[in-house]
Amino acid sequence: MGNRHKIIDLNAWMSGEHLSPLRGQAWLALLVPIALIVPNIALCITEDMSWLTALANVLFPLGVYALIMSAWRRLGVTTWLCFPMMFFGAFQIVLLFLYGGSIIAVDMFLNVVTTNVNEATELLANLVLAMGIVIVLYVPLLVWATVVLVKRKRATSRFMRAYRRVSRPLCLLGTVTLGAALLWSPDFAVLDDLFPVNVCHNLGLAVGRFQDSQNYPQTSKDYTFHATHEPIDSADREVIVLVIGETSRAENWQLLGYERETNPRLSRVEGLVAFPKALTQSNTTHKSVPMMMSQLTATTFGDSINRVKSVITAFREAGFHTAFLSNQQRNRSYIDYFGEEADRCVFLKDDGGEHLDEDLLRLFAEELRDTVNARKFIVLHTYGSHFRYRDRYPASAQRFTPDDAIDARVSNRDRLINAFDNTIVYIDTMLADVIAGLDEQGCRVCMVYASDHGEDIFDDERGRFLHASPTPTAHQLHVPLLVYFKDGAMETRRTVAPSLTETEGQASQESPRMAALRGNVDKVVSPSEAVFHTLLDAAGVATPVFDPRLSLFNPSYTTPELLYLTDRNQAVLLLESGLKPQDLPLLPK
């Protein structure tokens, strides 16, 4: 008799009436777990997992999803209870399309709240396929669940009992598999490797960090550098400038060996030293820029970012007039707080409009015309080479064509590279204008330019694009770093490092500081550590946190240990940051 009822139930379940969302929800109960497990299956393919770890990543979540769907006859309710997992699944699928691997990192959640709307819109417009998959996978289930919920429909008790007889053993099997993975896969950790537990953990960390950043004004209010000014000589006027580049990679700079003429003006500037072996410690703006602007490094960032202030405060304490001029949009990050330390803080995009980086030059000229303050420290935060590249420069910088590609596809790479190279031509013009303005001052001047991180542009078979990925590439880490210095004295100034015999011949003609810059040009440099100390050294600003070994003006500059700051704010050796064999030949030796 029992077998006969089971046959009848099975026939009823397979009948056409159960395909209707209003008359039966069997298919909804089955399809939700299947849709939710898709990201897990994808991660098993993209990530380096053992077979046991991969099995646990599929069976355990699948069993839990099935158990949730079997908990209540109101399947519309249980489906919507699974919405957070659908959101994470959709986010993960988009991320896999964008970067080709890795789970949703802490930094990815922070990027959601620190990326401006226009930038996000430009990016999503180029993820049509990923968005289409997400919509097809999850939206119909949510619509179906909503209809079922509104109509107050319930699954039959018989079906739910049968469903539980499957979901409970499946969940038990998944639990056993998970336990086996924990026992026999020593590198497996639930908080790191089991989706979506790892993503939920990362979300919690991101929320905590965001709250910390909102409390920054209180946690840092008593910080002081105890900075003083110790003039290098009797000069009574100085102008020190930091130009923060965005998304510019070293391999596309003519000054650093690129075959294209992307630096037509800077390549003719005397007194400019380009450092070809600069590696950032982060591929994200909200970490890289604060490290450049403070004494923080990969080893101290996580513990101290909430307590310290920026180099702007050090210069203010030393008696300099300070200005922070930005072509970025405010995004409630530490960079905003650092900028607001200045005597004058201007975010161009506060007016709601779009600006090119050259609009910063008007504000810069205003600062230079100021005759009240003899000593000035100015920060220019550019928008640089952010995608979409073609929107970052005017027609006057259109040196390489065709450059009209706005879709991020491998087939468009040549056009994308043309547009990206044009952004370098544009920043070349801007930096040359900054230097020209400094030269007119007739006093000691220094300009340091460094990009926060680089960019992937479909450079190899991995097909990776953009930056800020959970694991970096050499293209994202190798950045341009330039220093221009002029102390008002007669100097022999060059663009590239001279040979040894030339250096000996020039030793008596150029200042020791210029000689030190040139002497350090072949060393591996971390802008994350060197920029802060180099700026202080350029102006003779003394503070207990100043480390002369990290100043490029020091002939004994010491290359620090090459580190990378992970999304969990842990400092790891650069070679342990997730770099692949394709990256190693591209790293500076």
Image: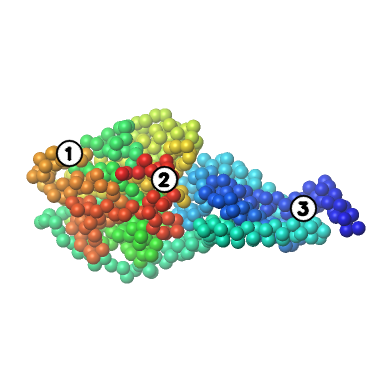
Specify the quadrant of the image occupied by residue 298.
bottom left
Q: What amino acid is found at the position of numbered circle 3 in the picture?
A: Ala
Q: Is residue 545 left or right of residue 46?
A: left
Q: What amino acid does circle 2 point to?
A: Thr
Residue at the outermost right position: 1
Identified at 80% across, 50% down, the residue is 18
Q: Nearer the viewer, mark 1 or mark 3?
A: 1
Which element type, helix, strand or loop, lies under badge 2? Answer: loop
Residue under pointer 3: 26
**The N terminus - image quarter:** bottom right
Alpha carbon separation for disc pair 1 and 3: 78 Å
Tag 3, which secondary structure?
helix
Snapshot quadrant of residue 234: bottom left
CA distance separating discs 2 and 3 = 46 Å
Question: Which circle's residue, 1 or 3, is located before the other in the chain?
Answer: 3
- Name the spot of residue 488 as percent of width and height, x first: 13, 47
Does dot 1 land on a helix, a strand or a loop?
loop
Q: Position of residue 219 (x, y in %)?
A: 38, 69
Q: Residue at x 8, y 45 (%)?
A: 508
Rate crowding at label 1 as few (under 14), some (14 to 19) or many (20 or more) other CA atoms within 10 Å. few
Tell me which amino acid carries mark 1.
Ser
Residue 82 image offset from top left, x and y in percent = 65, 57
**Where does label 1 land, which residue?**
499
Mark 2 / mark 3, whichever is N-terminal: 3
Q: Which mark is residue 473?
A: 2
Q: Are marks 2 and 3 in contact (CB under 8 Å)?
A: no
